[in-house]
Image (cartoon, rainbow, N blue to C red):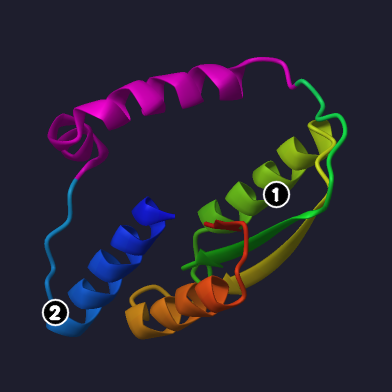
Amino acid sequence: MTRLLFFLFFFISSAIGGNSEYWSVSQYLNKEPNEKKVSLYFSRVVREKPIPIENQSKPVKIMMVYPGNQISDYWRRSKVSFEKRMTELQIDYTLENHFTKPGTVREQAKHLLQGVKEDVDYLI
């Protein structure tokens, strides 16, 4: 939850303050050495054959906020891929989508804060 709150703070303060500094993934991983291990582990797990979840106590609540209203279908394909993986893992979940226009940072921030208020399990 701490990472999420930090991300939200950074995201919203950047939007309001007009800060346009972006980091590449490699720059971020160099600044946060612990995240490099997490990233490598995640890559390995995603490439492995899925192991279905057993004994899930309740559905996982997920909210997706994507700048998906654009010509490229990258974000929509990402969502489809995500849903297929959840099915392969046999994870019971609810998914709330918010596709926004690129550059509508305030709208995206509004949806992210809504997810925090609704106490979703994961914000993407």
Q: Which residue is drawn at 20% across and 27% down?
A: 33
Q: In this view, does 12 lie to the left or right of 56?
A: left
Q: How crowded is mark 2: few (under 14 residues within 10 Å), some or many (20 or more)?
A: few
Callout 1: SS? helix
In percent of width and height, residue 119 lies at 60, 69
Residue at coordinates 43% horizontally, 84% vertically from top-left?
Answer: 107
In this view, the residue in front, 10 or 107, is 10
Q: Where is residue 4 in the image (x, y as percent from the top left)?
A: 40, 57
| Discs 2, 1 touching: Cβ within 8 Å | no
Residue at 36%, 54% in the rendered image: 2
Is 38 one of the magenta-colored residues? yes
The stretch in magenta equals 24-50
Residue highlighted by disc 1 = 80
Q: Residue at x 80, y 41 (%)?
A: 91
Q: Position of residue 13 (x, y in %)?
A: 21, 76
Question: Disc 2 designates what residue?
Answer: 18
Earlier in the chain: of badge 2 and badge 1, it is 2
What's the amino acid at mark 2?
Gly
Report the disc number at residue 64: none
Count of numbered circles in the view? 2
